[in-house]
Amino acid sequence: MPGSPRPGDLLRIDGRASVQFAGERALVFRVLSVDPRPTYHGWVWLSGYVLDRRGDAVDKREVFVHLAGLRRLVPRRPARRLRPD
């Protein structure tokens, strides 16, 4: 993933980012903040929301992940509403 995650980013966190998220434990995560304190090289603490299949926040979490294993997702655009004439 080029560059560090930023608030608002939508990420896929799975076993590539940390073994604790392998298989069925993978999640979609909306970043709220990135902890600026130094950790192990290439790793970072993120805080944010776990999203369900509909994109609704279901849990607030802090996760410790390997930057190279994160996958940025493209958020779905909401359906456009037509304005009546």
Image: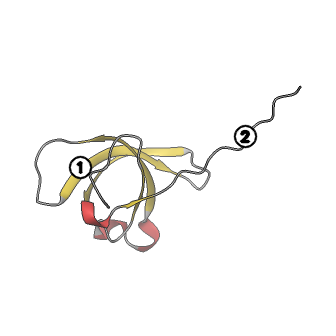
Q: Residue furthest bottom?
A: 23
3D distance between C-alphas at marks 2 and 1: 35 Å
Judged by depth in the image, the label closer to the viewer, 2 or 1, is 2
Which amino acid is tagged 2?
Arg
Which percent across, then down, holds residue 5?
Answer: 31, 49
Q: Position of residue 71 (x, y in %)?
A: 39, 62
| Relative to 46, 79 lies left or right | right
Of the 4 image quadrants, the one containing the C terminus is top right
Where is residue 55? Give x, y as percent. 57, 48
Q: Residue at x 87, y 28 (%)?
A: 84
- Disc 1 secondary structure class: strand
Earlier-in-chain disc, 2 versus 1? 1
Instruction: Look at mark 1 in the image and give the residue it sits on.
Output: 45
Figure quadrant of the N terminus:
bottom left
Picture quadrant where residue 6 is located: top left
Left or right placement of residue 61 versus residue 80 in this view: left
Disc 1 crowd rating (10 Å Cα; few below 14, some 14-19, many 20+) is some
Q: How many marks?
A: 2
Picture residue at 13% right of the left edge, 43% below the top: 37
Give the amino acid at mark 1.
Trp
Instruction: Confirm or deny contact between disc 2 and disc 1 (CB under 8 A).
Output: no
The spot of residue 61 in percent (x, y) is 36, 46
The residue indicated by pointer 2 is: 80
**Lateral position of residue 64 relative to residue 55, left or right:** left
Q: Residue at x 76, y 36 (%)?
A: 81
Pick the front one: 10 or 80? 80
